Amino acid sequence: MFAIASQTLRTPTGTEENDNVFLPAGSAFASAGFSSSQKPSRDDLSGVDSSGGILMIIAEKRLIYHETWYHGLMCGIAGFIGEDRGRIDRMTDALVHRGPDGNARYVGNGVSLGHARLAILDPGPEADQPMWNDKKTVVIVYNGEIYNYRALARAEQFACRTTSDTEVILKLYEKYGIECVKLLRGMFAFALFDTAKNTLFLTRDSSGIKPLFVSRLGGTLSFASEMRALMKALPEKPKLNFAALSHYVRLHYVPGPETLCEGIESLPAGTILSYTNGREQRQAFKTAIEPIAYASKTDFSQHFPDLMDMVVKDHLVSDKPVGIFLSGGMDSSIVLHHMCRHAQKPVKTFTVRFEAKEEEDAARFNRDADTAKKTALHYGTDHREITLTAALCRDVYRDTAKALDQPNADSVAMAQFVLAREAKKHVDVVLTGSGGDELFGGYPRYRIARILSLLQFIPAPLRGAAGKLLGYPEDVLRMSTGPALAERLLARSETETNGIVSGHWYRPDVTTELFRKRFEAGRFKNDPVRAFMEFDRELWLVDESLRLADAVTMASGLECRVPFLDPLVISASHGTNTSWHTGPKRTKALLKDTYYPILPDCIRSIDKASFYPPLAKWFRRECAPLVEHALAHPRIRELFDTETLKRIFTEHREHKKYGLHTLQMIVQLSYWFDTVYDHA
């Protein structure tokens, strides 16, 4: 753990080191020609490690945080094995919304690569992609931002001809091979082709912030930032993946690596795929940062805000305007707090307000917007509210479904879509508070997992009484922690879903098996709370929340950055005791105790509400045509029991039974068929 303000460096056990950071023999610094007297001091590095000859830079304070040499690219990438100018043109053109500032292709050496550019830092033509190394043997198309590339370039003494992080990736690859991805602190997805090895490498950051889809259909390997673009390279429409569709019915999103199209997958986060002469290999990787160990809650509260301040400052670097999606919750308010410490002029903040014709609805659905407005006033931001009306929701529903690329029945999607569209008029980059709940115990389910882990030490006859005192249902208290609890809390039950499907395609067991495998593969089997937090971070956060955010922001050519998912913050989370985060009646306790003395009163005094529009009411009235469209859709009628769905809709409209979740699920799916699957 380290305290930035005092420039103190500690090992994970909490002991202080001397001024010079130890660099093992054979490390990148040593191989670059540094003598012992030239080793960087703790002013240069907040932590280094070496494994297998690869330099592990945790953070480079002076260079990362106090200099500006930063040219990242948010964009879209596409390509395939083979040479076909027409195909790569179609794929790249399908990504123009992700990169409206220009695009380019390379066709040759047995590959086709395309790149659509969103120039956040207005790079000149020397940073254009596809980019080659100096020897013209390695070419890359890359989507992302690398926050420590300047430190890496300095450490390796690279002589760069551009100010682009893309060039640094190429040089790191030349020195370390594809294992260099472990050094990259940022969000990225890229394809790199080594002509000497005749090998194509595909990879994606270990937090899954940037998407990448892969296919072997048509007899060749192809890839793209979005599934719609990938489908442009296929000779025919792929078949429906009924296992993935079964997941969607129960979870209301599609968990990776599967997609709704057979033969197309979402490359798992933290994966390196290599393809050589028709042979494919894969390996998993993590960003090379060791956990930071905090000795106590007080230790965390004293030092974490300094780390977060550095991380947020790093995420602010841009030649284009930067703003923030301010939700009214603690996480986005924390990010705003640190943004304001470094902003030269008022930060631009954006919030959605929902049309609510009744006073009760206004209080219920706009509590977050009210809190965000008070927070913005406290920090003196340039605040904008976008009102999502029922009519606007109906009008943008189709475009939102198209942008999502895969169906996602999260009703916040339309709100984020219109928010991104409006924000793009004023900024080119937005920060969000995503990831804070998964890293610091923000969901009630973590509290339940902790209680269940404690109840196992109470005699069985007394568990029911203890649970009842805490207000939990008996069926939950009888569960074990892990996959059974996750399925109970996160998936629609088989009883709820069996009656709405038609035919024999539906397989609810695939979700049960997915949850079981994910928990079994987890690293924290002896810590039920941490296991659940990691399960959420690696599944729901990646495939639902981050995928949704990337899709709706990039649909408007808007870059979305997530400081809470910086590897340094993840490392800090792993350096805490999970008992600090949850209690019988509290969630996110450690972060609240740390930031409540810092944040405005409006954040401390009101618990965050759910950031959702009154879609249940809108489906009864103004947005009813969306449901009617789904019920009449030929593919929905083929896959589902429409008589049952009509009954659910009728009961919902007549206030007899709440049916929003099922209705939203089929409406999203119907528009996915219209805009993606049947439009390819």
Image: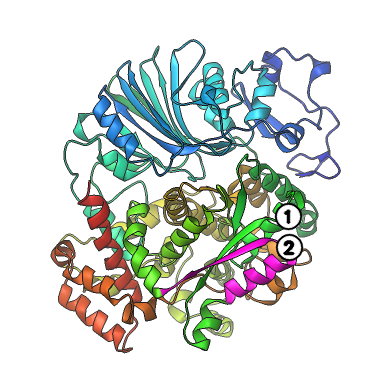
- At 24% from the left and 62% from the top, the residue drawn is 670
Residue 9 lies, in percent from the top left, at 80, 38
User: For residue 663, what is the image quadrant?
Assistant: bottom left
Amino acid type, callout 1: Cys
| Displayed quadrant of residue 671 | bottom left
Residue type beneath disc 2: Tyr
Front in this rendered view, residue 3 or 420: 420
* Residue drawn at (78%, 28%) of the image: 21
Q: Residue 392 location, x and y as percent?
A: 39, 69
User: How dense is the environment of label 2, judged by Cα within 10 Å: few (below 14), some, or many (20 and up)?
Assistant: some
Q: Residue at x 46, y 50 (%)?
A: 550
Helix, strand or loop under label 1: helix
Residue 504 in sight from this viewpoint: yes
Task: Let me know if residue 136 is in the magenta part.
Answer: no
Q: CA distance from mark 1 to mark 2?
A: 7 Å
Q: Nearer the viewer, residue 516 or 120?
A: 120
Residue at horizontal 34 percent and vertical 69 percent from the top: 394
Asked if residue 237 lies left or right of residue 449, the reply is left
Q: Quadrant of the N terminus?
A: top right
**Residue 51 spot, x, y in % from top left:** 61, 26
For mark 1, does the 10 Å Cα neighbourhood hold few (<14), some (14 to 19), or many (20 or more) residues? Answer: some
Q: Which mark is residue 379?
A: 2
Q: Which residue is mark 1?
A: 340
Tell me the tag on residue 449: none
x, y (%) of residue 547?
Answer: 43, 51
Of mark 1 and mark 2, the one earlier in the sequence is 1
Query: Of all residues shown, which one is farthest toward the front?
Result: 425
Asked if the residues shown at circle 1 and circle 2 are in contact, with their CB atoms under 8 angstroms apart, the answer is yes
Q: Is residue 321 above or below residue 23?
A: below
Q: Which residues are magenta?
A: 367-389
In the rendered structure, the answer to whether residue 245 lies left or right of residue 473 reads left
* 150 up-or-down from 322: above or below: above
